[in-house]
Image (cartoon, rainbow, N blue to C red):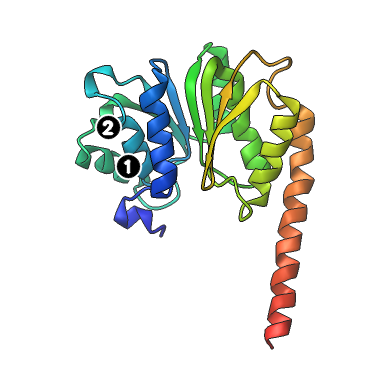
Amino acid sequence: MRACAETLEPETSPEELAALTDLLKGAGLDGRHLEIGTAAGGTLRELLASYPADRRPPFVVIDPMSYFPDQLGTVRRNLAERGVDPDGVEFRVGFSQDEFPKAAARGERFQFVFIDGDHSATGVMRDMMWARLLEVGGYLCLHDVGPRSPDVLWVVARFLRKYPNYEKVAHVGTMLALRKRAPSAEPEISGLDRLLAHPVKMGIKWRRSLRRRLGNRAAS
């Protein structure tokens, strides 16, 4: 059981959360907001609370809701206890790679995307496809962009090399905020990107396993 399932607290640090909420309060966004991966909804409730109830933009959450028992019920209770109506959030129970083609076919667009889901290279790469639906001037934010998450670092580094139209506007703790300054020359995340992510994921997994084995030998 994840600790947040009982505490209902955000898994972002106070400094990271402050950076996110300050960005929303100052950006003047009124279009759709998207969160991919919500855990117990601790960060979500604070993002929603960044806006006055009568001027809150539409929020969409995508999550398989299988991290712990009754995850969706826990998220809804968390929002309600913060004074945020959970019925005002559109919950899409599923995986982002399955929901993406449906949203793209409907022509959906977002002004804010926050990614904090599967932290493997393949998982992050799939989630980053949602940048295709981000409006110019909108913000793409990711959590756990730091040395403890090498998969995330690799995906972000590759993304920024390929898409220079995204500029860094904040990197607080492990929370990275990017702004889409102009349309992308090609659709974000290609088949090659997704293909390359798999060996990277396996390589990182192998190195971690090797370090653990070597550490256990040294300890004995």
Whole-percent x, y for residue 125 in the image: 66, 36
Q: CA distance from mark 1 to mark 2?
A: 8 Å
Question: At x 71% / y 38%, what residue is drawn?
Answer: 157
Q: Are marks 1 and 2 in contact (CB under 8 Å)?
A: yes
Residue 220 vs 104, above or below: the answer is below
What residue sits 75% from the left and 60% below the top? 206
Circle number at residue 75:
1
Q: The residue under label 1 is which amino acid type?
A: Val
Decide if residue 17 is in sight here. yes
Residue 190 visible (yes or no): no
* Extreme residue in the bottom direction: 220
Q: How many marks?
A: 2
Occupied quadrant, residue 163: top right
Q: Nearer the viewer, residue 46 or 206?
A: 46
Q: Which sits in the foreground, 148 or 33?
A: 148
Q: Secondary structure at mark 2?
A: helix
Query: On the image, which quarter does residue 19 sit in?
Result: top left
Q: Few, some or many C-alpha atoms within 10 Å of disc 1 (few <14, some 14-19, many ≥20)?
A: many
Q: Is residue 170 above or below residue 29?
A: below
Residue 76 image point, x, y percent: 28, 39
Label located before the other in sequence (1 or 2): 1
Packing grade of label 2 (10 A; few <14, some 14-19, many >=20) is some
Label 2 sits on what residue type? Pro
Farthest-out residue, top: 107
The image quadrant that residue 89 belongs to is top left
Give the residue number, with chain letter if any, for mark 2. Answer: 86
Which secondary structure, mark 1? helix
In the drawing, does residue 7 fall left or right of residue 29?
left
